[in-house]
Amino acid sequence: MSLLENLQIVHHQIDRATHKWNRPNSDINLVAVSKRQPPEKINYALNAGHRLFGENRVQEAYEHWAAHKESGLYPDLKLHLIGPLQTNKIKDALGLFDVIETLDREKLARKLGAAMKEADKSLPCFIQVNTGGEPQKSGITPQELPDFLRFCRDECALDIIGLMCLPPVDESPSSHFALLRKLAEENGLKHLSMGMSADYKDAIANGATYIRIGTDIFGPRIT
Ligand SMILES: *Cc1c(COP(=O)(O)O)cnc(C)c1O
């Protein structure tokens, strides 16, 4: 299967799901997750006209994207950071990414706010919510969310546009997607980043506005 066909299939599935759930197609933003994919596949995706990508590591994102961004050939290219951000990588992240999806702790919020102010930038951010309360997973608990949101906005001047989650692998994702949606509604947030290759139709049913698809577009990752 070629990457172009894969992209068409995913778009078709998005069309079907939005139609089924009576949502406008334009609600769904497809983040193509290019982590651990070879450069030639990234080039295919760009040639196919795709412009919104996600990466989970800052260093690898530079290897994949710095030259494309600097080339000026893709002025509408947008990159989302979808993996954990260490505070010592904040400056680098601000130099490349357009959106941070993984705001998951106070220390990061404070340092990110300060770094954006210094760089005179204001990147939109998602707060990552640990909907499953998993100890090994990053994210704010649902209970902490209202206070954390206030902290991010009032004390760190961050532009919070929505919530992001990664449901536990061994559970049905629907209840987690529904919880994230409820939390977004309660807190007046517009965007929901949820759903990956295995469960994006479910996520669309539950109100996703950003879906993050790697394997279904690019095929299996290297390593
Ligand atoms: C890798 C990754 C994805 C994409 O996963 P696929 O199952 O390949 O679609 C989505 N979101 C995050 C946070 C990821 O790390």
Image (cartoon, rainbow, N blue to C red):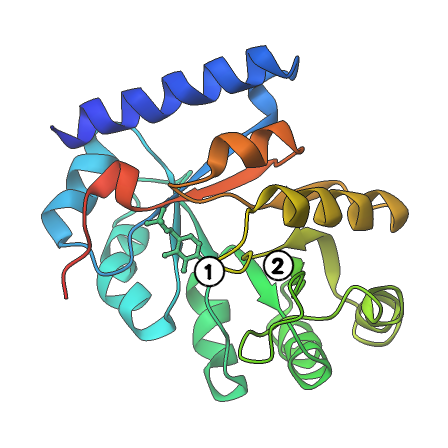
Q: Is residue 10 above or below residue 66?
A: above
Across and down, in percent, residue 22 comes to: 66, 12
The residue lying at 49 percent from left, 73 percent from top is: 84
Report if the beta carbon of the residue with label 2 is closer than 8 angstroms to ligand 1: no
For residue 205, which numbered disc appears in the image? Answer: none
Q: Residues within 10 Å of mark 2 (few under 14, many from 20)?
A: some
**Is residue 7 shown above or below 154?**
above
Which residue is labeled 1 in the image?
97
Residue at image mark 2? 123
Total numbered labels: 2
Q: Secondary structure at mark 2?
A: loop
- Residue at point 65%, 17% (across, down): 23
Image quadrant holding the N terminus, namely top left
Check the image and report above or below for 136 versus 215: below
Residue at figure coordinates x 14%, y 53% from the top left: 39
Q: Position of residue 182 (x, y in %)?
A: 81, 44
- For residue 126, above or below residue 202: below
Which quadrant is home to the C terminus? Answer: bottom left
